[in-house]
């Protein structure tokens, strides 16, 4: 077959570029129309849910899309703090002290698409008529009148009421944490070495957003070698608000809350002194937060598709990450799903009401239509959460940690030189681009970056679980780790008689 002439090749490339530009234009136009309609729908659903909440719970429940963010924040036991310049922060009142809490402003600052376009246009026009001063501004805070209400009886241990909301599932699996006999800890799937084997190391697995410990126990755990099973203790947790773990309705699911619960349910309960951490997606942020808090205890960090977006100077980090994770585009489809989950509080609540509250019906339907066990457990992980947990975790962890990740990675680079760092990313990941992992590598040059061809955000593990298990075992057995961390002995008295979950049963 004759090769195309240079002129023909140029014409073909030009046609491809035009087709790509036309496709992007169509995507932009359709996205504008779709998300403008979704803005209106979310506003209507806001009123609908206010009426339904009052009908079922005899109480008006404020939301983050209301005109006053103070109303929502005060109802959850926090205070809105206003800052000159238009930004806001949150102060949380705990026991006898006030401290800044990790609340992302993206919870209550999500302008509609049409409003955002108008605002950006006005901003660009103003740039032509005025010069921007580069002088440093002094940041001042003023606590508004909500603090008066907070000081009137809300100081002290305010206990949460462990009762699911009317729109949440109340089955035993989802609401078992409400039982009086429940410990209040996270649900933990633990796998110990056989009896009589005393020398062990510990490995903690942290799942990603809208998932559960089954992401690991159904894939990696069954494919671990006998050598690994006899040497390590494995812990896979259901994060706060997901799976079989507690799902308190009054929690804000901040980074501190998630980390504290992991420490309480795994590190303290099982007397873990040093450990390897394997984390996927959102779990990578929690893994880094744990590593920074316990820098001398972490033997290795294995991060799968970490959501790290370096924030340009002069740009507000939370809003920047929100627009990178959820660009409000209808294509690819995963971007559409992420955009609905991030931008629309009441539409995403409707999805949870339809899917999560009635998850047993959907699970039955999936089992009926497919015998594929992998798909079944993925659906179970997707269904077992509440909207309150998913909404706050998404904003407060992924968006809210935008200003912290650089510091975390710097700590790993400078203070944790003995820690083996491995970053794995699927080349076909449409949710989080490969540039996220490349940015981690740039921040921590000694990190081992592995790009897996033909794999996406989920199939980076599922479908290649045997190979992935072997990769993990090689990381844990690294000679540099053996030299830096001596093996320890687990007291026989602390070895459980049986394997299984804890904290959620």
Image (spheres, rainbow, N blue to C red):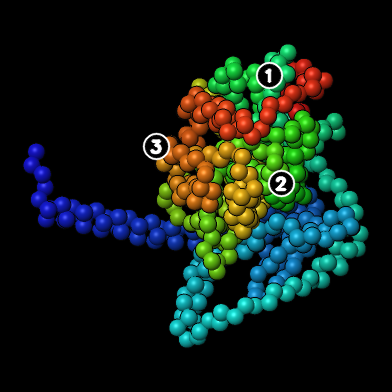
Number of the front mark, 1 or 3: 1
Q: Is residue 246 above or below residue 99?
A: above
Residue shown at the point (57%, 27%) measured from the top left: 477
Measured in 3D between alpha carbons, the distance from the residue under mark 1 to the one under mark 3, in whole angstroms, is 34 Å
- In terms of depth relative to the viewer, which is nearer, 472 or 445? 445
Is residue 386 left or right of 116 when viewed as pictured? right
Res. 350 visible in picture: no
Q: Which mark is residue 293?
A: 2
Residue 480's quadrant in the figure?
Answer: top right
Q: Quadrant of the C terminus?
A: top right
Residue 448 percent across, percent down from the top left: 49, 40
Residue shown at the point (48%, 26%) measured from the top left: 467
Measured in 3D between alpha carbons, the distance from the residue under mark 1 to the one under mark 2, in whole angstroms, is 28 Å
- Residue position marked by numbered label 1 in the rendering: 193
Q: Is residue 350 above or below residue 37?
A: above
Q: Evaluate if marks 1 and 2 touch, with contact meaning CB atoms under 8 Å apart.
A: no
Residue 503 percent across, percent down from the top left: 77, 31
Residue 502 percent across, percent down from the top left: 75, 28
Res. 402 visible in picture: yes
Indicate the secondary structure of the residue bearing disc 2.
helix
Residue 150 percent across, percent down from the top left: 85, 62
Query: Label 3 crowding class (10 Å Cα cut-off): few <14, some 14-19, many 20+?
Result: few
- Residue position marked by numbered label 3 in the rendering: 453
Q: Is residue 326 above or below residue 136?
A: above
Indicate the secondary structure of the residue bearing disc 1.
loop
Circle nearer the N terminus (1, 3): 1
Circle nearer the N terminus (1, 2): 1
């Amino acid at each position: 077959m004759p090769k195309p002439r240079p002129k023909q090749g140029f014409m073909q490339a030009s046609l491809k570029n035009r087709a790509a530009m036309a496709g992007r234009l169509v995507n932009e136009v359709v996205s504008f129309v779709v998300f403008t309609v979704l803005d209106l729908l979310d506003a209507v659903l806001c009123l609908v849910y206010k009426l339904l909440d009052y009908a079922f719970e005899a109480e008006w429940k404020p939301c983050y899309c209301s005109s006053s963010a103070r109303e929502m924040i005060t109802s959850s036991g926090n205070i809105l703090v206003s800052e000159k310049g238009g930004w806001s922060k949150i102060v949380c009142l705990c026991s006898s002290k006030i401290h800044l809490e990790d609340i992302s402003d993206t919870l209550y600052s999500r302008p509609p698409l049409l409003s955002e376009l108008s605002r950006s246009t006005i901003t660009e026009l103003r740039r032509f008529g005025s010069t921007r001063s580069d002088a440093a501004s002094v940041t001042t805070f003023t606590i508004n009148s909500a603090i008066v209400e907070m000081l009137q009886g809300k100081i002290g241990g305010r206990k949460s009421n462990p009762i699911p909301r009317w729109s949440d599932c109340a089955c035993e699996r989802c609401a078992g944490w409400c039982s009086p006999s429940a410990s209040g800890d996270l649900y933990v799937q633990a796998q110990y070495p056989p009896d009589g084997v005393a020398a062990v190391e510990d490995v903690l697995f942290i799942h990603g957003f809208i998932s559960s410990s089954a992401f690991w126990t159904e894939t990696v755990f069954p494919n671990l070698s006998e050598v690994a099973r006899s040497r390590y203790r494995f812990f896979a947790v259901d994060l706060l608000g997901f799976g079989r773990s507690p799902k308190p309705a009054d929690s804000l699911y901040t980074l501190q809350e998630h980390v504290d619960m992991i420490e309480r349910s795994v590190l303290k309960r099982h007397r873990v002194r040093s450990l390897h951490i394997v984390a996927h997606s959102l779990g990578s942020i929690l893994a880094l937060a744990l590593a920074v808090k316990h820098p001398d205890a972490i033997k290795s960090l294995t991060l799968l598709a970490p959501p790290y977006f370096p924030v340009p100077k002069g740009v507000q980090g939370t809003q920047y990450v929100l627009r990178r994770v959820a660009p409000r585009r209808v294509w690819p489809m995963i971007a559409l799903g992420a955009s609905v989950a991030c931008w629309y509080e009441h539409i995403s609540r409707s999805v949870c009401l339809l899917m999560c509250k009635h998850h047993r019906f959907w699970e039955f339907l999936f089992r009926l239509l497919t015998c594929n066990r992998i798909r079944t457990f993925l659906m179970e992980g997707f269904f077992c959460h509440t909207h309150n947990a998913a909404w706050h975790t998404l904003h407060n962890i992924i968006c809210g940690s935008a200003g912290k990740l650089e510091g975390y990675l710097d700590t790993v680079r400078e203070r944790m030189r003995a820690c083996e760092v491995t970053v794995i990313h699927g080349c076909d990941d449409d949710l989080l681009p490969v540039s996220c992992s490349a940015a981690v590598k740039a921040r921590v040059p000694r990190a081992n970056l592995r790009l897996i061809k033909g794999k996406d955000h989920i199939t980076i593990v599922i479908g290649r679980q045997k190979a992935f298990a072997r990769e993990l075992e090689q990381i844990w057995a690294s000679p540099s780790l053996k030299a830096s961390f001596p093996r320890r002995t687990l007291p026989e008295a602390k070895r459980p008689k049986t394997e299984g979950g804890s904290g959620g049963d």
